Image: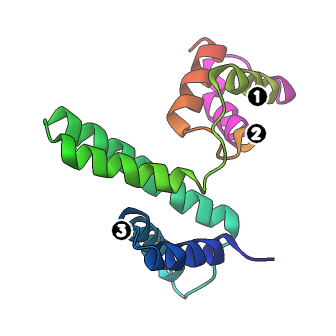
């Protein structure tokens, strides 16, 4: 079974042969970020697919934020480039939950832990993040947890 890193490497080679510059540069950047994460700490280690997904999620979020910043500054060409890079990364990320699905998952997690009230925001966030498992951004999860806890 091939790992996500192998899939990214093979897709980058395919894009390189097809002269797809956006995909090639985006996957190179992603593989570099994965390499940096592997050597972070005291010794080099191979990342699991879940850890690689976390790196890709961070990189995709950076692209979305940069695209917004460029668009706000009137730099449409740069914003389009960042958006295109984000779309390449989104191919490798799990499908994001809709607002209704997110609400249902969070309410199940809160009910399972018997969590109520804004004083339990920390444990509620931990339970909700575990239930969501990377299928929604942390900000969206936090907003939904706050809404359901009445905070």
The percent coordinates of residue 121 (x first, y second) are 62, 28
Q: Is residue 4 left or right of residue 111?
A: left
Q: Which mark is residue 58?
A: none
Mark closest to the chain's N terminus, 2 or 1: 1
Q: Residues within 10 Å of mark 1 (few under 14, many from 20)?
A: some
**Front-most of 138 and 42?**
138
The percent coordinates of residue 106 (x first, y second) are 72, 27
- Cα separation between marks 3 and 1: 38 Å
Residue with the mark numbered 3: 21
Find residue 38 and report its image quarter.
bottom right
Q: Residue at x 38, y 43 (%)?
A: 64
**Residue furthest front in the image:** 18
Kindly check if marks 2 and 1 are in contact, taking CB atoms under 8 A apart as contact.
yes
**Residue furthest top in the image:** 150
Q: Is residue 103 left or right of residue 137?
A: right
Q: Which mark is residue 105?
A: 1
What segment carries the magenta color? 111-129
Q: Residue at x 75, y 77 (%)?
A: 2
Residue with the mark numbered 2: 131
**Front-most of 10 and 58?**
10
Q: Main secondary structure of the magenta part?
A: helix
Residue 125 shown in magenta: yes
**Residue furthest right in the image:** 112
Q: Nearer the viewer, mark 2 or mark 3?
A: 3
Q: Residue at x 79, y 30 (%)?
A: 109
Residue 74 shown in magenta: no
In the displayed structure, would residue 48 be above or below residue 92? below
């Amino acid at each position: 079974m091939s790992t996500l890193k192998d899939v990214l490497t093979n897709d980058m080679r395919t894009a390189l042969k097809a002269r797809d510059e956006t995909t090639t540069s985006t996957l190179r950047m992603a593989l570099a970020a994965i390499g940096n994460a592997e050597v972070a700490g005291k010794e080099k280690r191979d990342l699991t697919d879940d850890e690689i997904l976390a790196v890709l999620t961070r990189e995709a979020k950076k692209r979305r934020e940069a695209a917004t910043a460029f668009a706000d500054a009137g730099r449409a060409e740069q914003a389009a480039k960042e958006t295109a890079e984000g779309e390449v990364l989104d191919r490798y990320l799990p499908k994001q939950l809709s607002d209704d699905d997110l609400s249902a998952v969070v309410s199940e997690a809160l009910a399972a832990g018997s969590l109520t009230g804004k004083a339990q925001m920390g444990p509620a966030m931990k339970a909700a993040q575990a239930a969501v498992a990377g299928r929604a951004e942390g900000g969206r999860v936090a907003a939904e947890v706050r809404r359901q806890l009445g905070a």
